[in-house]
Image (tube, grey):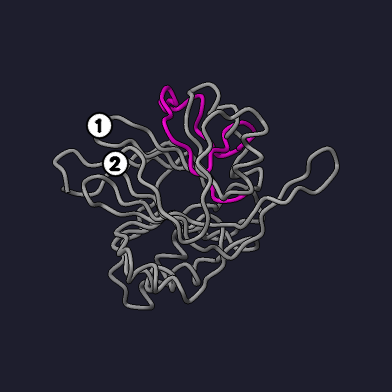
Amino acid sequence: MSANPARFTWLGHATVRVRLPKGEVILIDPWIEGNPSTPLPHGGVSLDRVDLILVTHAHLDHMGDVVRLAQSHQAAVVANYDLGEWFSSQGVAKVLGMNLGGSQVLFGARITQVRADHSSGFLRDGRSVYGGVASGYVVRLPDGFTFYHAGDTALFSDMKLIGELWQPRLAFLPIGDLYTMDPEQAAHAAMLLGCRWVVPIHWGTFPALVGRPADLKRHLAALKSAVEVVELAPGANWSPPR
């Protein structure tokens, strides 16, 4: 790991900012406007730079600000191929569409799109628009540190394969329940992945998302797991220990 590791910032719900050691910024599932848990535009958090946007699926609470931010920052957008075609039609100049199992290297980071068990679509002018398959991303940073952003997903046993193939040290896992895994399932996901740290996401934004980090910690303890839960407030930063 480099002497100057990446810095991860949870921006509420499923939005994560990753600042690479050389300053490039990756933004995952940007939903800022209308997000009741976002710290922006206050709280000392800035989106003054965005180089790359990763989108896990086509729900508003994961892609609501993709077009706006991609256009204002001339950022590249990575999404499943079908959703990428829609972003292109909306004026995003650089879309790097891909699909499950594929990888591409951007800003020195190897980005792999992996399975998620979830729906993907949105309403446009009163009609349902297909958003391609839902996904997660495994990202191996230039210094070798690897993290996994699960997007919205249920628990599935192939998370064990994600752990075996890519060995992510850090996982961003949804815990809210109703639309995704609950804390108990997320604890089992962390065990399958074999990760060292978990940041809970997709919780607390709305009353229906009842899962809490304390519940995740409790279930991990019951499994006698050494996984550490990194509980972040929206806008808080975390970097892996050197």
Q: Do the CB atoms of the residues marked 1 and 2 lie less than 8 Å apart?
A: yes
- Up-down relation of residue 79 to residue 192 (above or below): above
- Up-down relation of residue 72 to residue 137 (above or below): above
Q: Amino acid at mark 1?
A: Lys
Of helix, strand and loop, which mostly describes the magenta segment? loop
SS category of the residue bearing label 1: loop
Q: Quadrant of residue 7?
A: top left
Q: Residue at x 36, y 51 (%)?
A: 139
Q: Residue at x 33, y 37 (%)?
A: 107
Q: Residue at x 51, y 37 (%)?
A: 77
- Up-down relation of residue 26 to residue 242 (above or below): above
User: x and y percent of residue 121 in the render?
Assistant: 70, 51
Q: Which residue is mark 1?
A: 22
Range shown magenta: 29-57
Label at residue 108: 2
- Asked if the magenta segment contains residue 99, the reply would be no
